[in-house]
Image (cartoon, rainbow, N blue to C red):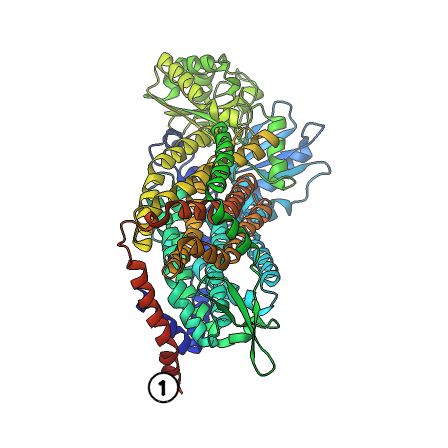
Amino acid sequence: MRKFFSALGRFSVRWRYAILAAWIIATIAITAFLPGISTVVQQNDQKFLPANSPSVVAENLAEPLQPANVTRIVIVAYRNNAPLNAADMNAISGIEQAARSVKGTLLVRQTSISRNGRADEIMVASSIQKLNEKPLRSYVGELSSAIHSVTVPSGLNIHLAGPVASQVANLNRNKGTSGRMQDFAALFIIVLLVLIFRAPLAPLLALIPAFLVVQISGPLIAEVAKTGVPVSVITQFMLIVIILGAGTDYGLFLVFRVRENMKNGEDPKQAVALAVSRVGESITFSAATVIVALASLSLAAFGMYQSMGIPIAIGVFVMLLAGLTLQPALLAIFGRAAFWPGKIKPVAADKTGSLEAVEPGQGSTQRIIHKPGVWGRVAARLVQHPVETLTTGVVIFAILAAFSMGNKPAGFISGTSAPSGTGAAMGNAALADNFPKAAANPTDIIARLATPVWNNATSLARFETILSHSHLFTSVIGPLDPNGTRLSASELVKLHTALGSPQSLFLSHTAIPPGFARTEVQAYMATASLISTGGHTIALESSLAAGNPSSTAAMQATPAIRSEVAAAARSAGIQKYGVAGEAAAAYDVSSTAGNDLIHILPLVVLVIGLLLIILLRSLIAPIYLIVSVVLSYLSALGISVIIFMLIQGDQGLVFFLPFMLFLFILALGEDYNILVMTRIREEAAHLPLRQAVTRAIERTGTTVTSAGLVLAGTFVVFAIIGGSSSDGGQIVEMGLGLAIGILMDTFLVRTLLVPSTVVLLGKWNWWPSKHGQEHWDYDDDKQLDEQLPQEIEKEEITAR
């Protein structure tokens, strides 16, 4: 393997200009000819549930009320403090005509006038599919422009409302968020690395490959999504964070090693080739742990996890290719200029591992004793007190981990509430104020009848009455009370006999039959959204006693609600029924995600453990490395509970935080494990173990902490910028939670606990490797290192 990376290093140095040109051409071509990732993003978490989830089954039962190939959008016209008048109704007729003129409109129909007479609800049916982002945004934009182009009387308000209008408002709000996230993350990384390197060019060289990979990965993922791979809005944001964060980490692994080699007196090109031969394996296995962890998500039942697996794995794989080819090529092209204006002084190391800076004197060579840096001093103390360090760390982490037991999944489904201040939000508020049903975000109870409701209205009446008296609901609105006007079962049947299907009626053209009041006819017309055309499917729209459907309390009340609905259905003789809406979907999402946590993560741990065994040639080291990650994960989860639940007062953590926290701390934390452990093994080949640990921590401490700060910082940017999107609550919790976990892992686990364990275990770290094998590896590596300069020089001459 070492020979392979040595050859790769020489190749990247020799063909540096061709490699740079190839990446630039590929970036231009891919971004020009392939679609962007935003074109395939799905907004609603419920769309990622398995087909057998109860909320999905209920949605399928409700399809006769709203066919899958038809999108319904609500227009609400209202006055704040007065009933609608004749002039308003004439204007509303003009609004209906304007809506019909928009391309893609199938039907426009008044569905209901509120009981107080202040609001009119108009339903627009469109052929534009809800999951087609660009066409949907375009259609809703044209519809909004059309209805607002109509002149209306003073005081009459017109707004789009309902779930589709809210979805589009969220899409518009999210537009540009990924771009801002990318820009701010890049700015943060550049400023941080300038402070670390004290050079303006080195940070750019570390970031350029990651930036190009972000541009390339999005279109590649969009192309793969055409095969059916789902992509969520979280995936779009996480792709940027992972590529910029992890990609810059891989760049830092290489840049720091190149600088170290140059300090050891190597020529810049030789330093690059030697660095690839030394850390290429670490970079490859670091990326492999992330790719394997992500690929395992394809086995998850929850589609949002699946949506992150393959897409982000593609991005990390492209980043690996760039890290092993483009990054070395850039460093070879710029050479010492990469670290300008700083000067790299050669440093020598004696047999004990102490460092000296070598400077030319007057007629002789002066050796200035190099004072160890922060991590050198930390490591020196650590190896003297490994038991105290390990014990203290484990106790602190165990206390923090105990708080993780207090976590409860929180209820939240993205894309169901319109952003504050938007027209959709005002329209939803008007629906809630003027109609007795939770029109913008109801919890729907669906029932499928064996015979049309017109022939079995008493069964409907019993079903609706039982649920209306349940303590779990504050209101239940059904076909017998659709807009605040009560209808009896017999009146519903008589109205159907006299008027036919409610879907065929239009308020302005329907005559009032003898024996009925206008309010009764209006109520019957309002049942069009609650009774299917054939009369076999009915819907009840309920408000929950537990609170807003997006709340954790509502989500946790779902099992009791389903049991209550089942009992009412049995009593009314209804065989097929279900509960749909945000609370039910959130419960199913949380349950599915929790099951994935139990079933997927052991597999991830096993596979990453196997990769560590292959890399470290040891059965012992991977065990405590995995254990350290688990401890780090539980501690980070415990801190998240303290911040978001105990301090901020949230009822629980967002449902996917525990899963994502474990996955990324495991995969990304192992990056630093791999760098530190491979360096300890390298140094242990020719130094006593304690000195090898000291040397390894001193040489890698700055690299690990810098990489950790970069990665944690990008997650903080993810939380701050992504917090302004429609999924803000989820993104803030995940971003800050992951940032906390990465920082703990970086500053405590990798640089303190793991080295302490290595010192205590001694030679058992590498069991069952044979004694002396490390020295054989060292001799072989030393021979390769000595051959590199001559081989590079020969290849340079050949190239010229």
**Which residue occupies the extreme right position in the image?**
154
User: The C terminus is located in which quarter?
Assistant: bottom left
User: The N terminus is located in which quarter?
Assistant: bottom left
- At mark 1, the secondary structure is helix
**Which residue corresponds to the image point at 58% horizontal and 83% vertical from the top-left?**
363
- Whether 359 is drawn above or below 712: the answer is below
Question: In the picture, residue 596 is in which quadrant?
Answer: top left
Where does the image place residue 775, in percent across and percent down from the top left?
32, 62
Question: In the picture, residue 91 is in which quadrant?
Answer: top right
**Number of marks in picture:** 1
| Mark 1 nearby-residue class (10 Å; few <14, some 14–19, many ≥20) | few
Kind of residue sitting beneath label 1: Thr
Where does the image place residue 344, in percent across and percent down from the top left?
56, 72
Decide which of 418, 705 is in the foreground and name it. 705
173 sits to left or right of 696: right
Decide which of 335, 81 is in the foreground and name it. 335
Decide which of 326, 460 is in the foreground and name it. 326
- Whether 475 is drawn above or below 158: the answer is above
Q: Is residue 490 visible?
A: no
Decide which of 561, 253 is in the foreground and name it. 253
* Residue where numbered disc 1 is placed: 798
**Which residue corresponds to the image point at 50% horizontal and 48% vertical from the top-left?**
382
Q: Is residue 198 visible?
A: yes
Where does the image place residue 214, in percent across and percent down from the top left?
48, 60
